[in-house]
């Protein structure tokens, strides 16, 4: 698969605090559903073992900026910092090359 | 944390075939250890549930190209395509902005 248009990736890496309740999972699932509804959203993948990695893909940088300041997402970010994340990092990236197996 | 120098990320996303034996885990762990020894390597994170996501970070694009063609890694890529991966994608990215919580 060759890349045809610009694409940006947001790599969100996190380590949860201990004793995280069910509320975290509900919030995380809700944020994925909400992200999918944003303009410029392309796709999202997520996995968690010791570390959690969520990578979302976007058409333009402005779409990422808009998602960052979306109202419900802002609340989730605040709760995440206060309650859930022992550590997190956000890396905003421009995809320069991509290839994949046949699906 | 502000970004001080250029950094590149390789996002490797994969879905495994069913009935994957122990050999896959041994290979995957070995590749992480081997990646860490390559020139230009910065860091790697990995998690797998339904989908597996491994993100490795590198100082320059040439380091990624060198790692891709490292001999033992080439063998692992071949075995992966033949035996282990139902699907995989590789996205090579330039990190344009990053921030993180205090550690």
Image (cartoon, coloured by chain):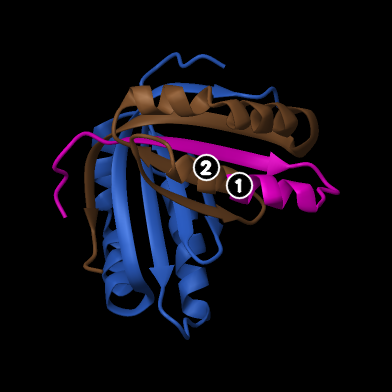
Chain colours: A brown, B blue
The residue that mark 2 highlights is: A34
Q: Nearer the viewer, residue A50 or B22?
A: A50
Location of the C terminus of chain B by quadrant is top right
Query: Does residue B42 sit above or below B85 in this rendering?
Result: above
Q: Residue placed at 28% from the left, 71% from the top?
A: B81
Q: Position of residue B23 (x, y in %)?
A: 47, 78
The residue that mark 1 highlights is: A30
Residue B56's quadrant in the figure? top left
Q: Which residues are magenta?
A: A1-30
Q: Nearer the viewer, residue B46 or A8?
A: A8
Q: Position of residue A42 (x, y in %)?
A: 34, 44
Q: Is residue A4 magenta?
A: yes
Residue B72's quadrant in the figure? bottom left
CB atoms of marks 2 and 1 within 8 Å: yes
Q: Position of residue B21 (x, y in %)?
A: 49, 83
Q: Residue placed at 22% from the left, 53% from the top?
A: A99
Q: Residues within 10 Å of mark 2 (few under 14, many from 20)?
A: some
Query: Alpha carbon of mark 2 to alpha carbon of mark 1: how far?
Result: 6 Å
Describe the element under mark 1 as helix, strand or loop.
helix
Q: Residue placed at 46% from the left, 16% from the top?
A: B3
């Amino acid at each position: 698969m060759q890349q045809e248009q610009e694409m940006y990736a947001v790599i969100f890496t996190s380590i949860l605090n201990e004793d995280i309740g069910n509320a975290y999972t509900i919030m995380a699932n809700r944020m994925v559903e909400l992200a999918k509804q944003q303009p410029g959203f392309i796709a999202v993948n997520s996995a968690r073992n010791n570390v959690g990695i969520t990578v979302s893909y976007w058409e333009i940088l402005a779409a990422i900026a808009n998602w960052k300041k979306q109202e419900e997402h802002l609340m989730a970010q605040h709760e995440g910092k206060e309650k859930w994340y022992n550590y997190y990092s956000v890396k905003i990236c421009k995809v320069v090359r991509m290839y994949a197996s046949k699906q």
